[in-house]
Image: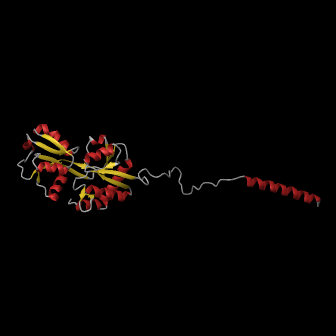
Amino acid sequence: MKNFKKIAAILLAVLMVVSLAACGEKKEPAPDTSDTPADVTTAAPADAPEGKKYIIASDNAFAPFEYLDTDTGEYIGIDMDILAAVAEDQGFAYEIQNIGFDAAMNAVQSDQADAMIAGMTIKEERKLTFDFSDGYFDAGQIMVVAADSEIKSLEDLRGTNVAAKISTMGADYAKSIAEEYGFTVTTYEDSPTMYQAVMQGTNSACFEDDPVARYSIMDQNLELKVVGEVIDPKPYGFAVKKGENAELIAMFNAGLANIKANGVYDEILAKYGY
């Protein structure tokens, strides 16, 4: 009996030591990897920045692409509608600033805006400082003169002063042929001021994007007319500062492709007569 009690006491002591050792050891729960495949990052994708609101600069008078609706006090137009449709499709937030074409380019270059959409023609010189989206509308230049003007060709501009909008393809084109055709060029900040200068006889003609000129003449009953053929059509593009906001260009391209595929793009153009 004594031997039995002695053995029992020893066994009990051993069990107590084991139990205390187990209680003193803290084990961390094993991570649950059942839903996380190997070599896959869980970071948010670069093309979907959460909580980001982009500042988008634009022109302030470039109908039918962007112009003020006097009934609502809001800017409307092809560019405005395309941007809204793309943003909805891609799920990004933005704030539009209609500050004028030249000011919009400066805002992007000085990091005061993330991007711009303003009927901006994609050309090689601009690619040095901007990254562009895929083209979303093709437009070329057209000569515009007063409704009662006798000017019919570039040769008739000799000895006159021609108007153009600063920093635009129209200004580039006018300056490129000014010496050949013997005229001088005056630049203006916006299209309405340029049109007024031509109607008042301050300038003999101006060069403007063809769809903009035709729409403005029709919509505003301007005493102007277009002369000659459309010159060198090129695509418009959505633009960011070179090397920055690549995710925004990617989202714009993806959204543009989607709204072209689902018919929204055609509906927008039809709304403005295209």
Here the colouring is secondary structure
Quadrant holding the N terminus? bottom right
- Left or right, 239 with respect to 178, comes to right
Question: Residue at the top extreme?
Answer: 179
Residue 90 seen from this side? yes
* Quadrant assignment, res 211: bottom left
Which corner quadrant of the image does residue 129 belong to? top left
**Is 36 left or right of 28, judged from the image as shown?**
left
Residue 107 percent location from the top left of the image: 32, 45
Q: Where is residue 19 drawn, in percent x and y?
A: 77, 56
Image vertical order of residue 241 relative to residue 262, above or below = above
Q: Is residue 85 left or right of residue 220?
A: right
Q: Residue furthest right?
A: 2
The residue shown at (88%, 59%) is 8
Can residue 209 be seen in this snapshot? no
The residue at 53%/51% (across/down) is 38
Vertical side of 126 occupied by 88: above or below: below
Q: Position of residue 134 (x, y in %)?
A: 30, 50
Residue 63, position as x, y percentages in the image: 21, 55
253 left or right, relative to 161? right
Which residue is situated farthest in the left direction here? 150
**Eyeballing the image, is 117 above or below 243?**
below
Q: Where, quadrant-wise, is the C terminus in this rendering? A: bottom left
Q: Nearer the viewer, residue 71 or 9?
A: 71
Mark count: 0
Residue at point 9%, 51% (across, down):
146
In the image shown, does 224 or 22 lie closer to the viewer? 224
